[in-house]
Image (cartoon, coloured by chain):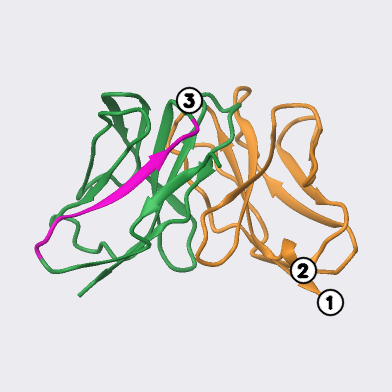
Amino acid sequence: DAKTTQPNSMESNEEEPVHLPCNHSTISGTDYIHWYRQLPSQGPEYVIHGLTSNVNNRMASLAIAEDRKSSTLILHRATLRDAAVYYCILIFGNEKLTFGTGTRLTIIP
Amino acid sequence: DGGITQSPKYLFRKEGQNVTLSCEQNLNHDAMYWYRQDPGQGLRLIYYSQIVNDFQKGDIAEGYSVSREKKESFPLTVTSAQKNPTAFYLCASSAGGSGNQPQHFGDGTRLSIL
């Protein structure tokens, strides 16, 4: 199974951009890179996903390295509501989807 | 509003008892999933279903069973064979089984042992 590696925790100041890294050196050509976030006692919320090109939506941007072995989730202007655990996972079909422990993002007012 | 509904929110199980967790979606999604989350951990896949009347085991299927008789419903039974069932259970759905579809999650069921 393709695995991802993320820092356990990160901090950022409110209203500043946040860059959350994810390494996936064993990614295959058909794996999509997905990002989700989870608040305590809630189900994960979809944030963004991509395959090869950088992606933008109303929540965030996803920057994918040219060799696809790493990616970065970018929150352009962090708010207190962005404090959550962020998961980076690789998905192809339904193959054994496993979310790692993710990155706990703390926003400092 | 379209979404996924899990019930109950909290559930208690006695030793030797089977319990069933409900998951209903009105998103018209073909694929549905069950995950287990232990405290401070990520999600692990229990079972998934890509189409009605068909489902496959995930990483930790032992002690669990599912059915998919209707497109909108994917109940999970935690059997007495599951010796450590205390966890947060999450149901999800997606429009298809390819990696190009996001998963939509319910709010979860927290199961505890009496």
* Element carrying mark 1: loop
Q: To which chain does the residue with label 3 belong?
A: B
Decide which of A109, B61 is in the foreground and name it: A109
Q: Are marks 1 and 3 in contact (CB under 8 Å)?
A: no
What residue do we see at 38% from left, 62% from top? B9
Q: Tell me, yes or no, whether the two marked residues, 2 and 1, touch with CB atoms within 8 Å.
A: yes
Give me the C-alpha separation between circle 2 and circle 1.
Answer: 7 Å
Q: Which residues are magenta?
A: B16-27
Residue A25, percent from left and from top: 65, 39
The image quarter containing residue A7 is bottom right
Seen as rendered, the residue at the extreme right is A16
Please state if B54 lies on the left or on the right of A62 as rendered: left
As drawn, the label of residue A109 is 1
Q: CA distance from mark 2 to mark 3?
A: 34 Å
The residue positioned 33% from the left and 59% from the top of the image is B8
Q: Residues within 10 Å of mark 2 (few under 14, many from 20)?
A: some
Dot 3 amino acid type: Gly
State the green chain: B
Q: Residue B97 has which mark?
A: 3
- Secondary structure category for the residue under label 3: loop
The quarter of the image holding the C terminus of chain A is bottom right
Q: Which disc number belongs to residue A80?
A: 2
- Rendered location of residue A13, percent (x, y): 86, 70
**Mark 2: amino acid:** Leu
Q: Are marks 2 and 3 on the same chain?
A: no
